[in-house]
Structures are given as C-alpha cells and as structure tokens.
Amino acid sequence: MDIKKLFPDSLCFKNDRKYHEIFKNIKPLIVTQIQEALKTRSIKQTGRPITTDFNKFVDALFFLCESGSQSHFVKDVFGIPKATYYRYLKIIGEYQILQKVYNSMIDSVPVSEPLITVKSMRGSEGLGRSATDRGRKGLKVSLICDTKRIARIVHIGRANTHDSKLLIHTIEKFQTPKQTVKCLCDAGYVGQQLSCECMKKNLRLVVKPKRVGRSGKMSHYLNPEDEQDLKKYRNQIELLNGNIRRFRSLMIKWVVTIATYECCAFMYYWLSDIFELLKIN
C-alpha cells in the first residue's frame, strides 16, 4: 500500500518549507515536555527502557490531524504501534503539553483587538446533547482570537451550553490587559450581565444588534466607529474557522473526545499566521 497515493495532498509528503520550518522549531519543545511528563508519572524508573522515537510520534500526530486518516496508518507509515501512539496521545492530553507550548510561543506577540466565536462540533464522550443537531452528543468551541487571526484562548464545552455562558468560562483563562480592549462578536452575546462580566477583564463587548421582543425593537445601537470595526474585522474569525476545516480530523467521527480535539486544534494553530509574526523564516 502506497500511503502517499492515498493522501497526495498531505503536507507530510510534500516538500513544504513552512511545514518543515515549523516542526524544526517546535519538535524539541514537545519532545522535552513529553519526557518531563514521563518522569513525573513514574517516580521509580523501572520497567523496560523507552524506545519510541518521539520525533516520529509528533510527525504521526500531525499526519493524523492533517489528513484525518485512521490510526492504523501510524504503524504502516511511522512504525509506531497503535497502542503506543494512543498511550502518548493520552499523556499529551492529560498534561496539556501542546497547549503549554503554544501559549509560551504567543506570549511575546502583542494582543490586538480580539474577536470571539463559538462553533459547534460533534463528539461522543462526556459531551452534551446538541439542540440543533437532532440531539446528537457534541461540543462547542469558544475561541478568542485577535485581528491577525492568532488564537489566544480556546475553551471547549458541552453542546447544550449557551454561547454567552460559554464565554464566561472562556474569559476566565484570558489574561487581563492593562487597558480596555474591544471585543467584537455576533448577536448571540447580547446581554447586560455578560457585558459586565467582560468589563471585569477589561474587555468591552461590541455586539451586533438584533431585534428582540414582539415589538421588534433593536437590542441596542452602535456608534459609527464600533459599527465600522465590526464590518472590517469580523470576517477574520470566519476565515480562521474556515481554515480549521482543512484539518479533516477536526470534522470527522474519529475525534470523539475533548482531549483529542484539543490536540488536533492546537496542531492547526501552529500552522496559522502565528509563525509569520514570530518571524520563523
């Protein structure tokens, strides 16, 4: 079986300079974090020595995230047993290794005007019943990015949680800026209580107005400056959501747990425009 013929568009099999430059910089960071996690898990260094090549494991993880292929290809292509792959994937999710490495890299990048979005996905384990997808179990991804499409905060919750309630949990992870920053979002975040909660984090919600009640009155009105910012920058979050669909494993049935979804999601964020801002050439 020629795996390259099955997945001809995969970045793993192309001479893609951006892909190789990215992983040349982040592979050592991920491998070091995995080794440190293994040391904390086993105080007594007993048993057989570890022979897994973690560089190949990272390549295998990216390949499954990017192509959406089944896990048995890990053994065929990278020589890593399926059970071994899932063992280290569980460790990465348990210790949030990818999230820590990603956050450490974007700390040096200044925050511009943030944007908020919530996207619903399907899943199976530990998730809520979706009210819009025939009651299937699913999850919602609450994402805060800036106008340069750099994902700042990612929070994953149940599908039966309202967007406004999900945002409150999201901003708890957000580092409070020194000055008040505009937060551009759609009409799903209308509400005075939510606005007050965001102001505690120096985030001023700029929400698209909507008609409420039987009278059809507008919920609120925006000043010309805020209205112009919504028209100018709101599409950036939609572009980010659209680009995420390139990673097939985020959209198909093999991603069933929140931990697996987070690993796949942060793999994508590394391939976004953040590396151009960090000047990795």
Image (tube, rainbow, N blue to C red):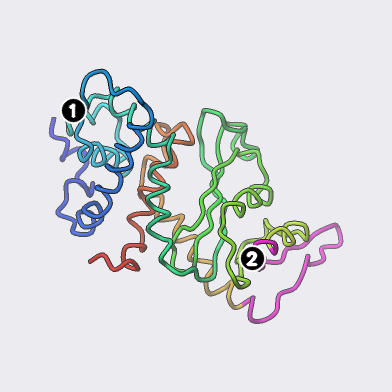
- The one nearer the camera, 214 or 11, is 11
Quarter of the picture holding the N terminus: top left
* x and y percentages locating residue 26 in the rendered image: 28, 51
Magenta run includes residue 86: no
Direction top: furthest residue: 47
* x and y percentages locating residue 99 in the rendered image: 42, 47
* Residue 158 lies in quadrant: top right
Return the disc, 2 or 1, that comes first in the chain's sequence. 1
* Neighbours of disc 2 within 10 Å: few (<14), some (14-19), many (20+): many
* Residue 213 lies in quadrant: bottom right
Tell which tag, 2 or 1, sits nearer the viewer.
Answer: 1
Three-letter amino acid code at the position of disc 1:
Thr
Q: Does dot 1 land on a helix, a strand or a loop?
A: loop
Q: Which mark is residue 51?
A: 1
Task: Find the magenta span and give its range.
Answer: 199-227
Direction right: furthest residue: 215
Q: Which mark is residue 203?
A: 2
Three-letter amino acid code at the position of disc 2:
Leu
